[in-house]
Amino acid sequence: METVTITMKNAPALFLEADTISPDAFAGKSAAQIAELPVFEGNNPSTLGKYFEIRGGAGATAADTKIVVSGDVAKVKYIGFKMTGGEVVVEKSTDQYVGAWMKGGRITVKGDVAAFAGTAMKGGEMVIEGNAGNYLGAAYRGDWRGMSGGKILVKGNAGSDTGMYMLGGEITVNGNIDVHVMTHAEGGTVIVRGNAKSKVGGQMVDGNIYIFGTIDVMMPGFKPNGEVELEVGGTKAKFAHFIGDVGERHKKKKGQVVYGNLYKKI
Amino acid sequence: MAEYIIRNGHVFDPVQGIKGDKKDICIKDGKIVDKVGSSAKVIDAKDKTVMAGAVEIHAHIAGPKVNLGRIYRPEDKLFSCTPTKGMERMGSGASIPTTFKTGYEYAKMGYTTAMEAAMPPLFSRHVHEEIRDTPIIDEGAFPVFGNNWFVLEYLKNHEIENTAAYMAWLLNVTKGYAVKVVNPGGTEAWGWGLNCLTVNDPVPYFDITPAEIVKGLMEANEYLGLPHSVHIHPNNLGNPGCYETTLDTLKLTEGIKAKNKFGREQVLHLTHTQFHSYGGTTWADFESKAKEVTDYVNKNKSITIDTGNVTLDETTTMTADGPFEHHLTGLNHLKWANVDVELETAAGVVPYIYSPNISVCAIQWAIGLEIPLMMKDPMRCYITTDHPNAGPFTRYPRVIKWLMSKKARDVQVDSFKHKDKVLSQTSIGSLDRELSLYELAQMTRAGPAKSLGLGSMVGGLKPGMDADIAVYNFNPEKPVANPDDIEKAFSRTAATFKSGVQVVSNGEIVSNGNKRTLWVSIKAKENAQVARDIAEKFVKYYSMTQANYEALGHHFVPNPFAIEVDATN
């Protein structure tokens, strides 16, 4: 695997929309060619090379390409956009839409990410060592197709609306989570090792939520369904099981109504 | 204005019966002329196809429900933005493009006239503001009448003169082009949580049937002698077995004669026929009844139709058939928006994905193609996608490919997940017909222009007609190696002229042309009763005053082109 290191040398005044920082866009290109890739600073078209110093060279394919993003990229959006393979390591915090629509490969962010990370993600793996913003693994604005595959791990806390319209895949949050978890979801899993606030599983059609800590306010649309012993993410524990959202439509499988599941550790 | 001569192209013009002969087309002062001076600009059309600018007879491209679709579907814009480029302003939207993108896309495909298919009269100002902001193409809009309280009250007693007087007033104040009917009576019935699924289901409170509404509107339309006929979206759209309602609706034309001075022969235009040609009793035994419907239309010259081709895309459905959209959101569980328009109509919007992996969608695709392939007279069948309902209008080149190439249809059928079902429930597999370029010109130019009563103005290349011309990179003398070449050729013109101005060159917009709003200005007999009824309804029921209702003046219709109708005799 070849490594390209891009280092912020000339910070943008406005937010930088850099959907070209992905192994797919870099693949087969030299440092000079990568510097020519288009980006937008606000609504002004520009090139990656104007902001970043680019060292190394990409592999022949996305899968053979590793990108290390270093320096202050707190105002850079869309890192790893639509990537299908390879690896991206972001050494500090970054802005919105990290790994949005990604299909494969791996993204590691050593700091925090802002909202919409993993929007409509289809596959691959994303590890966020800091905190995640709102709408992690959710659907794009207006859309009904959220994250459908792959894995996201947040070592810190996550914001609100995590897994909104989620269809598949798995999100694990080691810290706490803000309001609205898996709203409208029709599949997938969210595991929260810390505490949740409220609106957990609102209008959920299908899918699984595991909360290891507390839930401030339960949704009225979830009803108790006994207790179960489960092994979740390597931890064996006893959980109270709830099904819902009973106010939402549900599919039937073999004559049985399929509900969303909410498991709260006892 | 500059003079042009389009040299040596293969010309297809049903108006003059020209079938691919090499001819020069001359343009002067916005019109087609016999000859031009030696200083005329030459457009080399050697080995190219030359046709009149195409005429869109039915699309939802301006107005509140279109805009509602734009507002509530940001995801439709997500990966479909086009940045500012040369003459072009930025645009976005795949199934519901912005007004600017709408004008550019039509012009780039060689379309120069388009009709907005459903204008809620109360929001005619909004419709005209969007038409104004859609560059290049001439546009008109059809106000809806089929669920209007005035119409229901007058026709309950079969008061044709009063209906006609109201019709004339409404077309005049809304700057409307034709009489549109959507789910007659059914949308009003929905206010009571009901619907009209046959032509004999009574409308609650008004106690009138869809049959009485449609027949009365046709009589009033001919009483006034309007350029276009009644333009109908019948009851029971989109349901298995709906073709019977369609045939019942078509039979209402029997005994009604076209009366107008615009060369129009039909008394009813059936729109998006594909959605109205379904057999079966459930989605499981869903089947095509395209043959039954086209058999009737083939025999009955007083009807024209358009197709409503399903293009197998993710799109946005929008119609004044409020109850249908509610039904649809119950089927696909996607977001639903709905509006009731006071005394007049309603509308709903729901996104829809016509998936090639779903048998019903694939059968709908086949039905949409069977209809034009089964129609004997291409002058009475027009290609539409009921944009955006069955697919975006930007897919016309693909529909043309399917109609012109049996091979392209076979490739599509073979790729369906439920191929066998498509073949057993439709006759698409056994239809060998491939449309000729002449028939294509009939279905997209001369035919719709004639049906709209615009046949002497657009849709042809006869000297004296508007110089609306499309030149395609398509050599009719060369066999088509790959059907995709057809789609490519009709996607972007080599040149488009609109009223004598070159608006497209090599697929790029080079001018915003001289866009006009087409409307029908009617001189009608004074009718004191109708005038009093209108004033009373505004005082008693409307949420606005009569003075604020009219779409008037430079702001709403900056460049009007009025078609005059004298109905005083």
Image: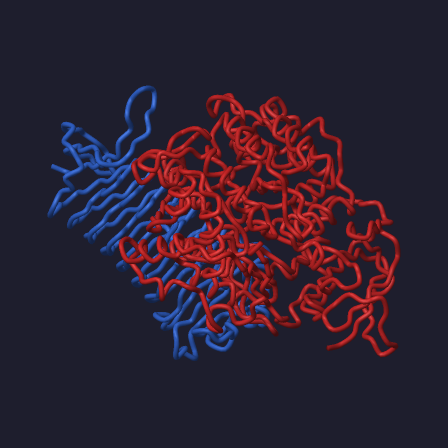
- Left or right? Give the position of B375 relative to B479: left
- Left or right? Give the position of A184 relative to B394: left
Vertical arrangement, residue A101 with respect to residue A50, above or below: above
- Residue sitting at x 53%, y 42%: B232
Q: Is residue B301 among what the camera can see?
A: yes
Q: Position of residue B183 (x, y in %)?
A: 45, 39
Q: Colour of chain A?
A: blue
Q: Is residue A3 among what the camera can see?
A: no
Chain represented in red? B
Nearest the eye: B165 or A181: B165
Quadrant of the rendered image containing residue B369: top right
Vertical arrangement, residue B384 with respect to residue B211, above or below: below
Quadrant of the rendered image containing residue A42: bottom left
Nearest the eye: B531 or B381: B531
Quadrant of the rendered image containing residue B274: top right
Q: Position of residue B259 (x, y in %)?
A: 63, 46
- Left or right? Give the position of A174 relative to B122: left
- Left or right? Give the position of B250 relative to A53: right
- Residue sitting at x 71%, y 70%: B502
Vertical arrangement, residue B563 with respect to residue A122, above or below: below
Q: Position of residue A121 (x, y in %)?
A: 41, 49
